[in-house]
Structure formats: structure tokens, C-alpha cells
Image: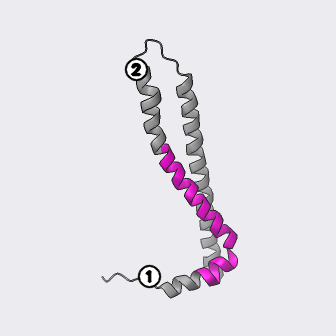
Amino acid sequence: MAKKKLDKNTLKRLFQNYIFKYYKFRFFLVMILVIISALSGVASSLFIEKLIDDYITPMLGESSPNFTPLLKALAVMACIYIIGVVSNYIYQRMMSRIAQRNVKSDS
């Protein structure tokens, strides 16, 4: 089965006649939310490394470790995850509504 190439004219028409005409603000909001979601995913991965190296490993050698800094770091990590989940939810919801309106208007 031959793979079809993306027609640039069709993509240009889609953006000019549909997305930028009816959903300009939502399109840019979705793009910002996608970037925030991706950055929160990257930040959470990097934060796990920092969490282990800076908080958990030094506490292994202590006889009575202080968990307060670790709990604060976990709270920051939870906020990063929450921001990622909320932005992902919002942009997925917006995209599904746009798609449903498009299908509804074509029917």
C-alpha cells in the first residue's frame, strides 16, 4: 500500500478557511496548552532525578532523617503534575469539541 503525501494546498486551505476563520483564539490557546503539557512532562522527569539525587540519597545515611524538605519537593512535583494534567485535559476537550462541531456541520 503506497503512503499518501500531505498535500500542502489542502493543509493551507484548512488553516485559512476553517481554523483561522472560526477557531483562531482556540487554536492558539490549544497550542499554548500543548506546550505547557509537554514542558510539564519534561519537568517532571527532570524533577524525579533531582528528587533522588538531592533529597532521597542524602537521607539514606542519616539515622533520623528530616522529611520536611522532601515533602516540600513532593508538593512541588505534585503541582507540576497537576498543571500538566489540567492543561492536557483542557486542550483535549477543546479539540474534541472542535472536531464534533466540524462533523456536525458536515452532516
Secondary element at image label 1: loop
Tell me if residue 88 comes above or below residue 82 in the rendering. below
Q: Which residue is mark 2?
A: 60
Crowd around label 2: few <14 · some 14–19 · many ≥20 (10 Å):
few
For label 1, the residue is 6
| In this view, 83 is above or below 57 | below
Q: Nearer the viewer, residue 86 or 47?
A: 47
Going by the picture, which residue comes out furthest to the top?
A: 63
Kind of residue indicated by mark 1: Leu
Q: Quadrant of residue 5?
A: bottom left
Q: Residue at x 58, y 54 (%)?
A: 36
**Residue 31: % across, % down:** 59, 64
Quarter of the image that includes the N terminus: bottom left
Indicate yes or no whether the magenta region holds residue 14: no
Q: x and y percent of residue 56 in the render? A: 44, 27
Residue 37 is inside the magenta segment: yes
Instruction: Locate residue 23, reporting x and y percent.
Output: 67, 73
Q: Which residues are magenta?
A: 15-44
* Label 2: element kind: helix
**Does 28 sit left or right of 38 as displayed?**
right
